Amino acid sequence: MKIAIFGSKHQKKGQVEKLFEILQRNNAEIYLQEKFYNYLKDMLRLDYKIEGIIKGNEFDADLVVSIGGDGTFLRAVSVIGKKNIPILGINAGRLGFLADVGEEDLEDTFADIFSGNYRIEHRSQLHLSTEHKEYQGFNYALNEIAILKQDTASMITVHAHINGEYLTSYEADGLIIATPTGSTAYALSAGGPVMTPDSASFVIAAIAPHSLGGRPLVVRDDCEITFDVESRNNSYLVSLDGRSNIFRTGTRLTVKKADFDLQVVKRKDNSFYNTLRNKLMWGVDPRQS
């Protein structure tokens, strides 16, 4: 199996050593993202036999492995792009909704992978477009697209339309459009609902709205949403999974479902509801801890 590994610069040496021992024992062809390769060599003093180094976005693999937190996972997703390569997230961070395989689960997880005993979840993504292609970079998002004020003082006004019909004008610090995957990320902190990954919906949630009526809204994922932004300093930020560009007012944003999805590798006994209970500690009484 040809495996491409993406990682962050905050790793437990023991966890990395365990991962490579498992992969080499199973005769995997290992390819490392260049920055992660340099980190392992220079900082952790690890030197493994690998088949190659991934220096840009052009690569091929049977599986991408992301080791880090959800941020590392999202960066790997932006490199995968439209390649249709499945991804597995190993958690070396904190919460980890996307990177949800712990060090204690590595052996069993890769035993399932090498035996073909796993499932694929298809996760929808968002596509951002503008008339003159102002966004520089990969204009798709797995979690969310956020429209944000650029300065620290004034709010922005976001005029929203759904399929050409006027929805409302949000006066807020920003606005989030989230996928079901992103419903447990930024949108959750803005008061949005948790959605199961297979939900055919998006969430629109205002960030610190200047109105009690600015409640999160769930819409069908086959609709086209457009936004016109007003800002006192004539500029604002647009962030796709944390990758931000500055936009000038007068730029109309169009957001819709991408024409491809992301394949996420999951163990057959790993359910979203189990992840919710573990990560959000649902049903746990802190008085009894």
Image: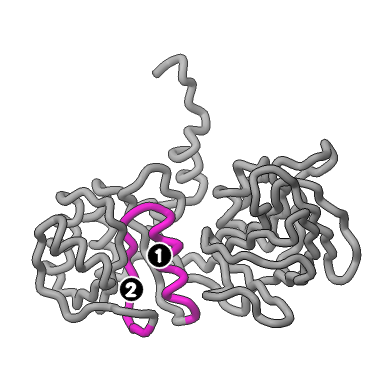
Q: 199 or 5: nearer the eye?
A: 5
Where on the picture, by quarter, is residue 66? bottom left
Image coordinates of residue 154 in percent, x first then y, are 73, 45
Other residues around mark 2 within 10 Å, as few (<14) / some (14–19) / many (≥20):
many
Q: Amino acid at mark 1?
A: Val
The span shown in magenta is 58-82
Residue highlighted by disc 1? 265
Left or right of residue 193, residue 1 in this image: left
Residue placed furthest toward the right: 165
Residue 226, percent from left and from top: 79, 68
Q: Quadrant of the C terminus?
A: top left
SS at mark 1?
strand
Camera-nearest residue between 152 and 122: 152
| Residues at discs 1 and 2 in contact (Cβ within 8 Å) | yes
Q: Position of residue 237 (x, y in %)?
A: 64, 60
Image location (x, y in percent) of residue 225: 77, 67
Of the two numbered discs 1 and 2 in the rendering, the one whose residue sits closer to the viewer? 2
Looking at numbered disc 2 in the image, what kind of residue is underneath it? Leu
Measured along the vertical axis of the image, is residue 260 above or below residue 157? below
Residue 229: name its quadrant: bottom right
Q: Which mark is residue 63?
A: 2
Furthest residue toward front: 233
Image check: 242 left or right of 72? right
Q: Earlier in the sequence, mark 1 or mark 2?
A: 2
- Residue at 63%, 51% (x, y): give it: 195
Badge 2 element: strand
Residue 72 sits inside the magenta stretch: yes
**Residue 94 magenta:** no
